[in-house]
Image: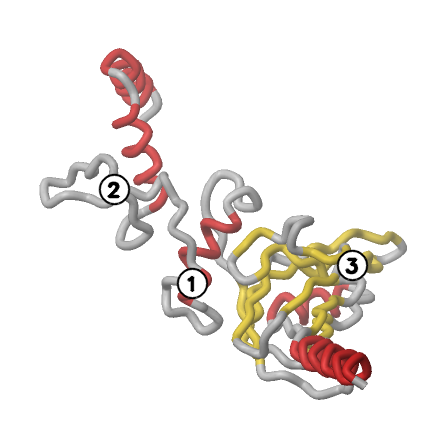
Amino acid sequence: MKFRLATLATLLLFTSTASFAGVVTSSSNVDFLAIDGQKASKSLLKETRSFNINDNGKHQVVVRVSEIVRSGSDRTLFESDPIVVTFQGSNEDIQISAPKLDNERDVNNFKRAPKISVKTLSGTELKSTQEYLKQEGFLPSVNLIENLSEYNTSGAAAAVPAFATTAMPAAVPMSGAGKAVKGKVTVQGENVAEQMLQYWYQQADKATQARFLDWAKNHK
């Protein structure tokens, strides 16, 4: 009798836990670039196009839509700019999908007004906010998490401040005299590229600083 009760309790606990967790998957033309402020690495992705969530709170993904489309008699690869999608989680599994893009007209329509669908597997449309992620820097794809962190502190429509990171060593605050404050890090109020130059200039020795200034003068 005790064994049966223990088994029943274990099954009830497992069922309760399982119902509280869900899997988020994407359609074949959608790739996850970031999940809740972090790069979509193998440690986060359950498979190539899915990951687990364990609550029904607010979540955020950055996605890219890729499609082979017809262009006259040729076929070309279309890849969208990164799109931020913020949505409310669900106890059900969720699918994030984009419409099928067959030709240039479909692509142009999508570029003007991208629409990413966020639905439970039972067909319920979940409330979501979406917009393009503005990219900055020499290599935007490399700086995606930094750009996303800045976006999440901007108050933008799909921003989630809780997912902003502070790991931006290139972002250095300014003193009243216009000089960078060495050893402190911030992500607000200044141009990130300028801060990168100021930060690394201060880390260099005097000889390297002098060579850099000579180089800068010759490349105005």
Mark 3 packing: few (<14 Cα in 10 Å), some, or many (20+)? some
Query: Depth check: 150 or 136 in front?
Result: 150
- Cβ–Cβ under 8 Å for marks 1 and 2: no
Please tell me whether residue 139 is drawn above or below residue 145 in the rendered image. Answer: above
Q: Is residue 79 left or right of residue 175?
A: right
> For residue 72, what is the image quadrant?
bottom right
Badge 2 amino acid: Lys
Q: Is residue 145 visible?
A: yes
Q: Which residue is mark 3?
A: 67
Mark 2 packing: few (<14 Cα in 10 Å), some, or many (20+)? few
> For residue 192, what is the image quadrant?
top left
Residue 25: image x %, image y %?
74, 67
Viewer-nearest of discs 1 and 2: 2
Viewer-nearest of discs 3 and 2: 2
- Check disc 1 and report its element: helix, strand or loop: helix
Badge 3 amino acid: Glu
- In primary-sequence order, the first of circles 3 and 2 is 3
Mark 1 packing: few (<14 Cα in 10 Å), some, or many (20+)? many
Please tell me whether residue 24 is drawn above or below residue 3 in the rendered image. Answer: above
- In primary-sequence order, the first of circles 3 and 1 is 3
- Residue 184, labelled with which disc? 2
Q: Residue furthest front?
A: 1
